[in-house]
Image (cartoon, rainbow, N blue to C red):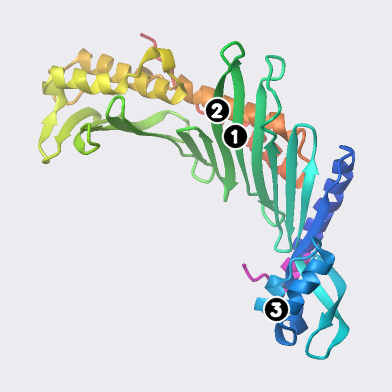
Amino acid sequence: MEILDRETQMTAVAGVLEEMQKAEEYVKSWNVGWYEQLSDAYCLPLHTEVGEADIRELEDKYKPRYKLANAFYFGDSIGIPLAKETLVGFDTLTEKSRSFTCEFGRIEWFGMDTRNATRHFSFCNNGSIESSKSAKIGKIQTSQHPKRVSYETSFNVLSSDFDITITLDQLIDSLRNRHSRDSISLSLKDGVITERFNDIEIVRNFNTGMSSVEIVKAHDKQNNASVVLKASLNPDDSLKRISVEIITHKKNGKVNGTYRFDASREKGLRAYFYSRKGLQIDLTSDPALLSAANASLLPAPDHQNRDEMIISNFANSTRTTMAKSLSERVVSFDESDFNMEAVLQAETTIMETIKEIKGELPLPGLVERIDNYLSLMNKGKRLQFELPNH
């Protein structure tokens, strides 16, 4: 745990206790019960004067109110506590009952069950606050209520940073009971926003104005290929460079060869094939091999999802661009050739999902940080890819 100076500790504890109070007021409107557990304990007598068996007995006496293992194993102060309580237990050495004043650095809420989900909250004296919602699997999804949303959140009252991870299970065909399952995450840290939608990752650095997109497709045994797409953007959101690496595999999983496409305004579009033995072939001089590379990029249309759409669009754009001038040494680069609309769609889904869960979050500090993120994104800083005009 990071050691904070006393003034910072006081600020952190005051902020956490305020969030706890407001969260408790909000949660009470749900008409649910829960139990509170105190942990990260500090009590010097429990560390130096009492045996482990007595401490376990003390825990059992108040179960599940306290976790005291930390006090037994560590004698260091936890700093300014979130709570201080007196416990009465039996001391085997003196064969008498005695009182122990314990300080606690963490307060957690458990057993907060509603009809559709269960929730958990954790408050720490270093300023960290975590919460989670787990959707109940037994709840039947219908066409009127197709979504099942679970998430985990964290933030610290001492900074504007936060993290949210969301699992979105959605009924897409009630007759066949077909579901889509998406993993969404969002974090803001030191002025850098990282958004993730399944295999698509978008990173925006508001300190430099630069942004990047990365897609990593794991080894697909059906096509025997894995794909990595990376794109970087200028501060005005114009496409600076983009690359795709396709690693082909044999049926036994071993690497067979690698196709590499690079496009930038400075160097144009380059395409090479690297064999397993290190042989390099310029694809601009081998249309047949170029066609094979593009075929590896194109997914079957009946199961195409957003990350596959982006890679597929790049493949089509590459083929179109290179067909313009296969005889040229360096193929000219025009960012309008590359359709990244699916990236925009992924980012829109992330933002809309965040907006949906924001309304049910009982932590005003987290809501404030989410509003800050949405404000940043709405100030014209979303990805502004040029769409193809051909």
- 10 Å neighbourhood of mark 1: few (<14), some, or many (≥20)? some
Drawn side of residue 218 relative to residue 109, left or right: left
User: Which quadrant holds residue 259?
Assistant: top left
Q: Nearer the viewer, residue 27 or 174?
A: 174
- 10 Å neighbourhood of mark 3: few (<14), some, or many (≥20)? some
The reply to whether residue 256 is visible in this rendering is yes
Which amino acid does the dot numbered 3 rest on? Glu
Q: Do residues under tags 3 and 1 come within 8 Å of each other at their CB atoms? A: no
Question: Which mark identifies residue 167?
Answer: 1
What residue is disc 2 on? 181
Residue shown at 40% from the left, 29% from the top: 239
Q: Which residues are magenta?
A: 1-10
The reply to whether residue 243 is visible in this rendering is no
Secondary structure beneath label 3: helix
Which amino acid does the dot numbered 2 rest on? Arg
Secondary structure beneath label 2: strand
What residue is disc 3 on? 52
Q: Is residue 60 magenta?
A: no
Question: Which mark identifies residue 253?
Answer: none
Q: Total label count?
A: 3
Secondary structure beneath label 1: strand
Residue 26 position within the rendered picture, expressed as x and y whole percent measured from the top left: 86, 42
Which amino acid does the dot numbered 1 rest on? Thr
Q: Gap between marks 2 and 3, in whole Å?
A: 46 Å
- 10 Å neighbourhood of mark 2: few (<14), some, or many (≥20)? few
Q: Do residues under tags 1 and 2 come within 8 Å of each other at their CB atoms? A: yes
Q: Earlier in the sequence, mark 3 or mark 1?
A: 3
Q: Earlier in the sequence, mark 1 or mark 2?
A: 1
Q: Gap between marks 1 and 2, in whole Å?
A: 7 Å
Q: Earlier in the sequence, mark 2 or mark 3?
A: 3
